[in-house]
């Protein structure tokens, strides 16, 4: 409830006037002695709202600071879909009401996405077949028409097996392939190196089940695929997304109402970013978030001297937490804005309490739909 500063390893309550003076002095010191890019502005995903965009404006007006790029969450899948289609654009959840087959892959919306789950149940009442692919017997799987349990991490091979079956049975949308895809023949040649028996063993899915879900997906017309975050927790998992995208493209389920391969939404997508003034600092330094600890320790010209953290808990969330802790301890100052003294507060020397959503007047985007919430 109060700003805190660390003295001799202990937190002490201070006034907001003192806290803001300390913050301003630390920022000024970093800028004057090392340059503004010696400041790392770490904005996590805890509060991605319209007004939080203005945070970037402050740091851009300083002359540009070091910031983060990439993701430890949905970035791998998003990157795969961007490689295929230029941009990741999911279908609006209500569009699944027009699907005849809904394939939920690596996701448990009955628990994690109750808004979408209600729509899926309505689609099922209208006659849509619901197929869940998940190694775990989730609540979603229990209420599906078919539940496939592949070996963990074999999802890309499962998509390849389904594509081979489509090719063998001529279940292709030749017009879509000709007009809207590249490298189809190369992909077919690549698949020739694999047999269905081999892929069945890799995925731990019997051949008859592979044929059954492929038949349902191919004849759904339209059939939609809803992807989860579980698919991204493996090395080279962007390829899994690309194999699944190819499955939809070959059957003409891309760009079709009731079809598509839907993953996530850009929670900032409907907000106007011009007020952040990113154009003023096009050359600001960016640090890859998956290896932030390693990058901070190696950073020179200038080194990172001040880390300003909002809406995140990097010491608990980032990979190789011991290296992240070492990196944060190596800088002169760490300022954290949060509701509680979390793990990262252990290496901070100034804590600024933030308001909660219940205390804010703001607009919030969503990871899972196209609505903006006040």
Image (cartoon, helix red, strand yellow):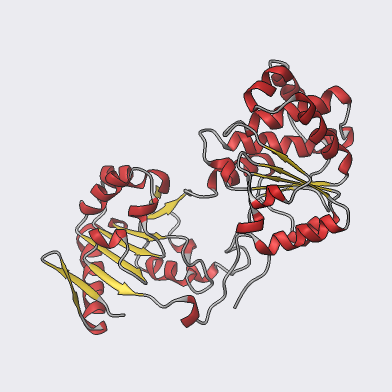
Q: Residue at x 64, y 59 (%)?
A: 113
Query: Percent x, y for residue 221?
Result: 88, 44
45 or 229, nearer to the observer: 229
How many marks the image carries: the answer is 0
Q: Quadrant of the N terminus?
A: bottom left
295 or 126, nearer to the observer: 126
Q: Quadrant of the C terminus?
A: bottom right
Query: Percent x, y for residue 152?
Result: 57, 34
Vertical order, 359 against 73 (above or below): below
Query: Percent x, y for residue 193?
Result: 69, 15
Q: Residue at x 74, y 55 (%)?
A: 91
- Is 292 on the left-hand or right-hand side of 178? left
Vertical order, 251 against 337 (above or below): above
Vertical order, 2 against 328 (above or below): below
Residue 347: name its quadrant: bottom left
Q: Residue at x 38, y 49 (%)?
A: 318
Vertical order, 197 against 337 (above or below): above
């Amino acid at each position: 409830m109060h700003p805190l500063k660390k003295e001799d390893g202990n937190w002490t309550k201070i006034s907001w006037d003192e806290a803001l003076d300390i913050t301003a002095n630390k920022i000024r010191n970093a800028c004057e002695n090392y340059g503004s890019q010696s400041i790392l502005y770490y904005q996590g995903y805890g509060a991605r709202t319209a007004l939080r965009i203005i945070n970037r404006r402050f740091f851009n007006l300083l002359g540009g600071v070091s910031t983060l790029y990439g993701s430890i969450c949905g970035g791998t899948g998003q990157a795969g879909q961007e490689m295929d289609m230029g941009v990741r654009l999911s279908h609006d959840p209500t569009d699944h009401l027009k699907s005849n087959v809904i394939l939920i892959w690596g996701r448990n919306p009955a628990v994690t996405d109750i808004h979408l789950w209600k729509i899926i149940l309505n689609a099922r009442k209208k006659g849509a077949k619901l197929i869940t692919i998940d190694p775990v017997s989730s609540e979603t799987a229990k209420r599906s028409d078919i539940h496939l349990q592949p070996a963990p991490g074999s999802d890309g091979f499962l998509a390849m097996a389904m594509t081979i079956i489509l090719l063998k049975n001529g279940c292709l949308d030749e017009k879509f392939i000709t007009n809207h895809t590249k490298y189809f023949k190369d992909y077919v040649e690549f698949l020739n190196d694999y047999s269905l028996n081999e892929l069945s063993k890799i995925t731990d899915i019997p051949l008859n089940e592979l044929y059954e879900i492929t038949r349902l997906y191919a004849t759904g017309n339209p059939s939609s695929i809803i992807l989860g975050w579980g698919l991204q927790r493996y090395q080279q998992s962007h390829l899994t997304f690309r194999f699944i995208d190819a499955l939809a493209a070959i059957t003409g389920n891309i760009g079709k109402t009731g079809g598509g391969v839907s993953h996530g939404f850009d929670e900032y997508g409907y907000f106007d970013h011009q007020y952040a003034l990113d154009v003023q600092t096009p050359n600001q330094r960016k640090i890859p978030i998956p290896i932030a600890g390693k990058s901070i320790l190696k950073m020179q010209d200038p080194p990172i001297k001040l880390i300003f953290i909002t809406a995140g808990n990097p010491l608990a969330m980032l990979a190789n937490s011991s290296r992240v802790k070492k990196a944060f301890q190596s800088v002169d100052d760490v300022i954290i804005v949060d509701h509680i003294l979390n793990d990262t507060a252990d290496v901070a020397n100034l804590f600024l309490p933030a308001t909660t959503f219940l205390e804010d007047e703001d607009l919030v985007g969503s990871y899972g739909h196209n609505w903006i919430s006040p």
